[in-house]
Image (cartoon, rainbow, N blue to C red):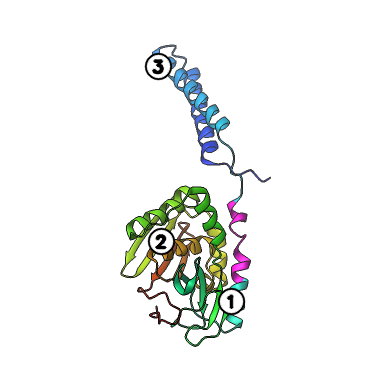
Amino acid sequence: MKFPRLNPYYSGSFVLIIAAAVQLAVAILTDRRDLTSAGLVISASICLITAVFLAILSTSEPLDTRYVSRLPVQGCINLCRTAADLGIQGSAHFIPPGSGGRSRTLQFIPVADLEDIPAAGDTFSYTPGSAGLQLEPSGAPLYAEIRNRQNMVIPRDLPALLSLVREIGEDVLEISDAVVTGTDGDMVSVTMKNYRLIEGCAAIHAESPKCCTTYPCPVCSLFATVLAEGQEKIVTMGRCTPNAKDRSVTAVFTVLPGQDRQPEMKVPVA
């Protein structure tokens, strides 16, 4: 028999019901009929009433994250396989609006290292120094929805930008109990603790760690897009490492040095 998954509020209500039952049992079995017994009965009544409110005012989890987390898995893996078959081995580069006449952030997967900014609008770029595949980031629909619904404003200051990343992960998407960010030179790390979609992340990583850097999942892609637009610089996906033991995921991004936003200008190699 498969029992339904309960959210923490339902679980808490069961604990309170058990506590109430224990207190009533103690009061009945001891049969002291004094102030202590009355206190136990009152405490049990409070626990029972609180449990009822928790059960009524909460609902079970609407979706099973074990299944939902696997929705983008095959798409990311297929794109990674396609890029590998085309000989494209570079990591994803998130190019912000304004670079090369772009009106939105695009993801570019170079054959090897990126030397030139590819022209906007080209899915396949054959220009020497910028040969590769240019696509919409997998997190683009998610980014647009958050920006429209939450009136999200992308700050330029890095500490404020990292604070926004934490807010998106913890409060907006609610995919992690805690999002810890850090910087080391031009690298930015984002660690999501108790990541609720880790099963999908682990499935992509199990296929190949390269899948995470070639065509990142919507969540990592979303964070990279926010960083690229906030810093107004190209951001590359360095690595993504899931940890099944503590259900955490660490993504590392590299912010490339500033560059002129003309397609013919050189971009420093990550």
Query: Three-letter amino acid code at disc 3?
Result: Thr
What residue range appears in magenta?
Answer: 65-77
- Would you say residue 174 is visible in this rendering? no
Residue bearing mark 1: 123
Callout 1 crowding tier (Cα within 10 Å): few <14, some 14–19, many ≥20: some
Chief secondary structure of the magenta span? helix
- Mark toward the start of the polypeptide (2 vs 1): 1
Asked if the residue under mark 1 is in contact with the one under mark 2, i.e. CB atoms within 8 Å, the reply is: no
Q: Position of residue 246 (x, y in %)?
A: 45, 56
- What kind of element bears circle 1? loop
Residue most toward the left?
Answer: 185
- Can the viewer see residue 91? yes
Judging by the rendered image, the residue that carries numbered circle 2 is 190
What residue is drawn where x is 43% and y is 66%? 228
**Which percent across, then down, holds residue 39?**
42, 17
Which label lies toward us, 2 or 3?
2
- Disc 3 designates what residue? 36
Label 3 environment density (alpha carbons within 10 Å; few <14, some 14–19, many ≥20)? few
> Of the residues shown, which amino acid type is indicated by label 1?
Thr
Instruction: State the quadrant of the N terminus.
Output: top right
Q: Earlier in the sequence, mark 3 or mark 1?
A: 3
Occupied quadrant, residue 32: top left
Residue 252 sits inside the magenta stretch? no
Q: CA distance from mark 2 to mark 1?
A: 29 Å
Depth check, front residue: 220 or 12? 220
